[in-house]
Image (cartoon, rainbow, N blue to C red):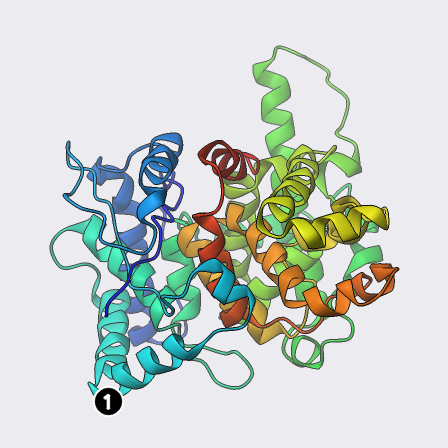
Amino acid sequence: MATHVPNLHPPAPTATTAAHLTSPRSTRTLRKLQSAHALSSNYTAAGNAPSLIAQQRQLQHHKSAIFRDPGPPPSQGQSRSRMRADSESAAAAEMSGAGGMSKRTAMARKINGEDGNAKEELEALVRQGPKGDLSRSLASLRRSVLLDGLAADSDGMSQLRIYVWLILLNAPPLRTDAYLALIHRGASPAYAKIRNDTFRTLATDPLFKRRVSEASLIRLLNALAWTLHDAHAVASTSNNTSAAPAPDPASIYLQGMNVLSAPFLYAARSETEAYVLTQHLLSAHIPAYTHPTMPGVHRGLALLDRVLALIDPKLAAHLAAASLAANIYAFPSVLTLCACTPPLPEVLCLWDFLFAYGVHLNVLAIVAQLVLMREDLLAVERPGALLRAFPPLRAKRVVQLAVSFVGLLPGGVYEELVVHVR
């Protein structure tokens, strides 16, 4: 029986610029990239995406029907995308490890040839752009990411992932010359801080170290620091603060930016692509995480404690009795969108989901990891040692649990999740 996941409405994309992104090495990949940006850039022009709060209020009104048909479509041209779940079990069954429906669904899809068709449709969408209604094409892309995933090798490398991320994040095009101009400006005011971080970025991950050089990471972060420096200067000018002091390096390069940029450099085909994605993620999707005081990160940690108490009161009470608030053990996971938890190929799969339905769902992904550790955590009086390093990430299982948690949250809590990154 076909079932449905909740309306995990992604945040509405922002307007993009008209410049062209740097071209890949071949004509074929250039066509893919151009169609990807055509799809991304035109989404806002479609004019039919409701606001973030409106979308989440729709979810609040309909969360009681989390695993059944949503009924008639909404009025005023708003599309409410409903997708089949990999599992039709309730959240309690999810937490106990029930996965039979997921296996049966996957087997049925393989027998019916749906897996191959989905991959072909995804590749055609990225290469040729949308056919017909744009919002339907984006909904189809998100559904494909959730149900089928992106084809990748054992190292997590995928021919389509970088283009799918550019679409889902609605990243603006950028000419390679613009990125080179930032590099040619030399060392930024934050250069010393950057050099202090780059050598230890994912230092124990052999896949990352084999594919991404420290020099590449330094260039990207230094270019990002110049971009933030210039934004600070523009803000000072607009506020009529002539002769404003130079920005503190701490305000243009923050803890965690190196780890957030690492998966982009690993998956991208060029530094320019990785820079565009990193800069847009920070400025458009998690701006409250990049403020010098990191208010979004602290709000996310407080929400993690509240959500865990709603999802698993016994586990939450056990951690509270051990004086283990989220800000003690989960700060890196919130700050880096779980990029600090290996293995890297699993991080890429988790990011596929987060970029498709909203990075605010990272809080639920962390709760899912805690639930997967539940038995071990409850078995010890002092679970702090187990939380110093999370177990290896299992992206598919984490996503299944995170989706199942959505219907268990009061509407107000979910709205707080959506806006905490802003």
What residue is at 74 percent from the left and 32 percent from the top? 293
Q: In the displayed structure, does residue 130 sit left or right of residue 53?
A: left
User: What is the quadrant of residue 163 in the picture?
Assistant: bottom left
Question: The C terminus appears in which quarter of the rendering?
Answer: top right
Which quadrant, please, contains the N terminus? Answer: bottom left
**For this view, does 175 lie left or right of residue 208?**
left
Residue drawn at point x = 48 percent, y = 85 percent: 153
Q: Is residue 52 visible?
A: yes
Q: Residue furthest bottom?
A: 111
Tell me which residue sits at (49%, 31%) in the image: 412
Residue nearest the viewer, comparing 316 with 262: 316
- Is 200 located above or below residue 245 in the figure? below
Q: Decide: is 345 above or below 233.
A: below
Pinpoint residue 21: horizontal percent, then vertical percent: 40, 56
In which quarter of the view is residue 373 placed? bottom right
- Is 127 in front, or is 87? 87
Residue 252 position in % (x across, y down)? 71, 38
Horizontal and vertical percent for residue 216?
66, 65
Bin the neighbour count of mark 1 within 10 Å (Cα to Cα): few under 14, some 14-19, many 20 and up.
few
Count of numbered circles in the view: 1
Q: Is residue 11 above or below residue 151?
A: above
Q: Could you say whether the residue bearing mark 1 is in a helix, strand or loop?
A: helix
Residue 372's spot in the image, x, y percent? 63, 67
**Which residue occupies the foreground of this view, 125 or 72?**
72
The amino acid sitting under disc 1 is Ile
Above or below — where is 340 with respect to 119?
A: above
Give the residue number, with chain letter if any, for mark 1. Answer: 111
Measuring 57% from the left and 57% from the top, which residue is drawn there?
Answer: 365
Q: Residue furthest top?
A: 240
